[in-house]
Amino acid sequence: MVDQRSCPSSLHDFATWKPVLRLLRGGAEAEQAASAMRVAGRIGRGSWSLPRQRRLPRSDRAALAEDMQEEMRAVERVRSALVDAGVDDVPFTAEMSPTGKTRLRLFGSSPAVEPGLGDPHPGSLVLVEGAVPRPWLRLPDPVPGAVPAPSADPALLGRTLHERLPDAIGATEAEIAAAETRLGVALPEELKALYRVTRSRWEDRVGDHTAAERECRAVGCELFALDDLYIAEASSRHCLWKFAAMEAVVTPPDAAVQGLVGSPGWIVFGDNGGGDRLAVDLTPGPRGHTGQIIILGHEENIGACLVADSLTDLVMRRSGERGDGSGGDGPSAVAHVNIRSLPSIEAAVHPGLEVLSIGVWEDEPLSLAPVTGLPRLRTLAAYPGTLADPLEIAGLTTLEFLELGPEEWRILLDAGAVPRSLSAAAITAHGIQDPLPIVGIANELLALWDRPRITQTVLEGDVGPAQR
């Protein structure tokens, strides 16, 4: 716990928080406001989550900013203090007595704890410094027979673009060589042909307000400058542990694109205008072509989709006829057991199972015995109350990520049975408003790996009596 006197920032001044606390007290039901009450929330630089019911807008219009003026003014004081302190966000909990005496508890950040998802509870705990989920470590499989598509034609590509962009400034051979050195990979001939026509630098288009639009029409995407090409390796696709641990790398035998997070052979050169990135693929799937064009969706954590068999096809507006692969009818590496998906853990079991998610369950709690000994099981996420015996987890010796409810974690901690194979963990806190017990469990887990704990700062003050 941090003593408030050691923190000179206004973030740790009770007066900074007083308007927010008074707002929460004033928005409570009369019976609750007249008794002791506990509230919890989170305020960040860009957003906030407060436990209060906002007034409904007038029936003749939608909600407007002025409907939230009081809340925005109260929050802005805290947000300004966050900026001054160099802090992104702060979860908090407060206990307010009927007289207004208040104990405010602010939870600090830890480099071992990922951000929460809007509520005041901590995110995933990274128990091993620098650890990333296994799919983020997967490299592409070799495809010895992969060759460029028959449609790949650098000469035709260059002539076509010269006709469409006669005034564009192309890259020199030295500039192309410099880009290859920076990227650590030789650019394919089609990509070189494109940049010999236009290097796509904004300074080359100063005063020509339609140049970028013409270039986009000519190429078929928003083209990146030669200097902005990058390799879409796994590290370029950041994802929180909670979600990344639920993914699996799967490449069916009929796939044109490997189901990777990223690849040293994915050279990103453009955008579709909606945040999805286009790349030349030098590490195709079993049925793909070297140099094919793929798109990496900004809402997806893994995989890519085939756009064209070659860059020439993209520029010439030829659509590919090959699919991305069916995936086959084999068992899935990711299994969801719940009231709407798989009806039992036994139905999920096979030697290639990597991820087991147990969701909402209305039957008797489940035994983990069927998955004990599976060689590739690395993730278990179990909704609170779904496990018959949480101590069975001790027999799952290959786990790298474990997500449980607080009661299940309590059983493992008290028994000294937390798997030491873990790289990260998460605490499911559905329906739990008070973050304090969750933070306590998180700190116990962090202590087992000697990782930095979540700090707490306690401030005391008075928000005044409840308004009748």
Image (cartoon, rainbow, N blue to C red):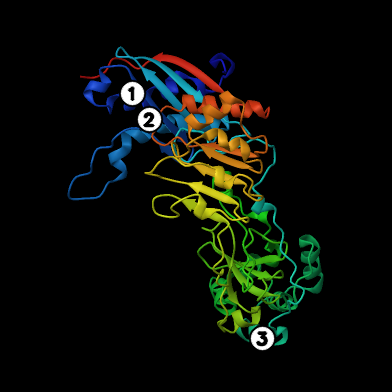
Mark with earlier residue (3, 1): 1
Picture quadrant of residue 17: top left
Total tally of numbered discs in the picture:
3
Q: CA distance from mark 3 to mark 1?
A: 68 Å
Q: Which residue is mark 2?
A: 74
Are the residues tagged 3 and 1 within 8 Å (C-beta)?
A: no
Q: Which tag, 2 or 3, sits closer to the chain's start? A: 2
Residue type (three-letter) at the residue carrying disc 3: Ser
SS state under label 2? helix
Could you say which disc has been placed on residue 22 in the image?
Answer: 1
- Looking at the image, which residue is at 82% across and 70% down? 174
Q: Residue 197: where, in percent of width, then height? A: 69, 78
If you read the primary sequence from the N terminus, does the residue marked by circle 1 or circle 2 appear first?
A: 1
* Vertical comparison of 163 with 278: above or below: below
In the depicted view, which residue is nearer to us: 97 or 359?
359
Give the labeled residue for mark 3: 151
Identified by mark 2, the residue type is Ala
Neighbor class of circle 2 (other Cα within 10 Å; few <14, some 14-19, many 20+) is some
The answer to whether residue 454 is seen in the rendering is no
Secondary structure beneath label 1: helix
